[in-house]
Image: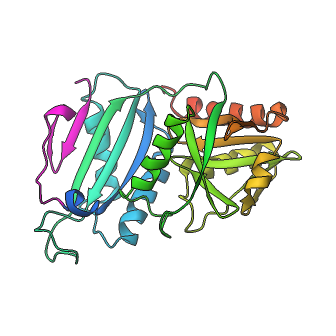
Amino acid sequence: MQNLGYYNGKYDLIENMMIPMNDRVCWFGDGVYDVSCARNRIPHLFDAHIERFFNSAKLLRIEMPMTREELKKLTFEMMDKVDSGNVMIYWQVTRGTAARSHEFPKDVKANFWMTIRPKEVAVPEKPITLISVEDTRYLHCNIKTLNLIPNCMAEQAAKDAGCNTAVFHRGDIVTECAHSNVHIIKDGKIITHNADNLILPGIARANLLRLADVAGIEAVQRPFTMDELMNADEVFTTSTTALCSRVSTVDGKPVGMKDEKTFKKLQDVCFGDFFAATEKK
């Protein structure tokens, strides 16, 4: 198969799959998701992504329809049905299927989705560009929910401006990007927003901090301002699908690009970790 869609035990090509109109995802976006990339059919940071997926469901009081081990087993079974071993794996769970009503339905089993699509993870050839957008999202950004309209609007605004993505800020405090975490380097140190309810606790972000410690690069977890962002020695993003990307402009103004040695060291350890962890045994 070129790709795969899975819904409650049934699977086919994604374009052939259908879901009930009463799935609460259709009415309320009532669910959570997570994403991992695999190379050689080996998902990167698999356990961390599954743990965040289950935690997001717990925070929304959604009872997962399977255990962690059952999800792992199913993921490998479904990956084996796809032609490419280099893929993006998307898991989603919704509260269930019920007539539209705002309160949680009773005695309804959660619906589980999975999609698997070909995806190559490669070292970026050039820095990315950002625009800044006021962060008007709600106060549960630490839950990886399906309610992503503000992120979509920000991403489209970036595309309309000819940029790669958008960086959010609440007042003067930088939070994260539309679909990645954002960090700065100043005086050889990484500064990244602490993992509270205002940002998604990125798996790539957590891995960056682990790898930075191994590489002997100090990391400070605290809020930082737009002024600090604009005057940083380096600005970069981390995400599951792009790992570690350097930023060259924000709102059309040059930023960073002053400490290539530190950034390159971080990027090298991030991609080195990915390729080593997903190498065929």
With 158 as the anchor, is 146 left or right in this view? left
Q: Quadrant of residue 106?
A: bottom left
Q: Residue at position x 40%, y 57% from top? A: 53
Q: Which residues are magenta?
A: 1-23
User: Considering depth in this image, is 165 or 5 the residue closer to the camera?
Assistant: 165
Q: Is residue 214 above or below residue 278?
A: below
Please say which color scheme the image uses.
Answer: rainbow
Q: Quadrant of residue 127?
A: top right
Residue 166 location, x and y as percent?
57, 45
Residue most toward the right? 187
With 161 as the anchor, is 156 left or right in this view? left
Quarter of the image with the N terminus is top left
Q: Residue at position x 40%, y 71% from top? A: 59
Residue 271 location, x and y as percent?
62, 31
Magenta run includes residue 20: yes
Residue 56 location, x and y as percent?
41, 64
User: Considering depth in this image, is 74 or 12 the residue closer to the camera?
Assistant: 12
